Image (cartoon, rainbow, N blue to C red):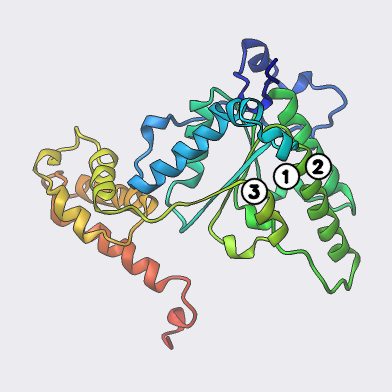
Amino acid sequence: MDKPLRIGRIVTESDKSKADCSKIQNKNENSCFDVRKPRYKYDDLILPQNVWHELDILQSMIVNHNLIYHVWGMDKIDPYGDQLAFNLYGPPGTGKTMIVEALCNRWNKQLIDINLSQLESKYVGETGKNIVQAFQQAREYNAVLFFDEADTVLGKRLSNITQSADSSVNTARGVMLKQLEQHTGIVAFATNFACNYDPAFVRRILKHIYIPLPDFEARKKLWQIKIPNNAPGYKQLNFEELSEISEGMSGGDILVSVKNALFDAACSTEQTVSNEIVLSAINAVKTSKEKIGVTGVAHGIA
């Protein structure tokens, strides 16, 4: 008889009813992580074709796990393969968090998203306990556990221990490694700085997917959906030109440009969104990326 797979279990109404943290026993207010529904759908994603293929493989890891492990016999080779950890990495603003939420929606699962501030504690040893609590809660709700800005929790362990805080960091990362090995659900990570990951974590994450900046066609679709189609002038916009000029920009950059363009258009005499107004917003966003935060520029010495 086939072994049931935890990571493929569909969320039931009973699971959803557990989302009220006040019902969790033996939890204090600092250790109860929010369990929520994903905000995005799979159809909301706009990605290059190679990323779609990578997500198809990730989907196969969910729906074909029983086939691979318990029919084809992979469980005899890898008896600890009931967990799935995947990592999305790439430039900022490329939609990594949105992809995780859309996948949760596709899998009919709730989401527990964790940031470093929720894990860290002023008390030595408490960070590790918070990590254990996060994994425990994910199992209880059959939810996807998501660590955004994951380089802050999966960073390289310290070899030169000079103070108790350093030892605590290494202990917490050791706890994370152990929890990943034992967990029988889905864990997602996202980062802009994958180079900071400890190699031990890289080995324990089954799937790493690079999320690049959008290509021409993806940028064109982003412009078409990010600018409201009932904005005056929408039908006259040249999306081919906007896509061409915005090469090198992320989806997040495009959204910022759209907002600036709309406010610019609203305060103009015509109150119409034009290519010129959008192009001006694009240039402003590109300039800010080049100048702000670059060493020396603010002082005129770069």
Q: Nearer the viewer, residue 203 or 87?
A: 203
Q: Would you name the residue on which mark 2 appears?
A: 130
Tell me where residue 173 sits by quadrant.
Answer: bottom right
Q: Would you name the residue on which mark 3 appears?
A: 205
Q: Would you name the residue on which mark 1 appears?
A: 118
Tell me where residue 23 sits by quadrant.
Answer: top right
User: How many neighbours does mark 1 have within 10 angstroms: few (below 14), some (14-19), or many (20 or more)?
Assistant: some
> SS for tag 3?
loop
From the image, state whether disc 1 or disc 3 is nearer to you. Answer: 3
Q: Identify the residue at horizontal 64%, vertical 28% (top origin).
A: 7
From the image, state whether disc 1 or disc 2 is nearer to you. Answer: 2
Q: Quadrant of the C terminus?
A: bottom left
Answer whether labels 1 and 2 touch (C-beta < 8 Å).
yes
Please report whichever mark, 3 or 2, sits nearer to the chain's N-terminal start: 2
Q: Identify the residue at horizontal 75%, vertical 36% (top origin).
A: 79
Expressed as whole percent of the image width and height from the top left, the position of residue 35 reads 65, 28
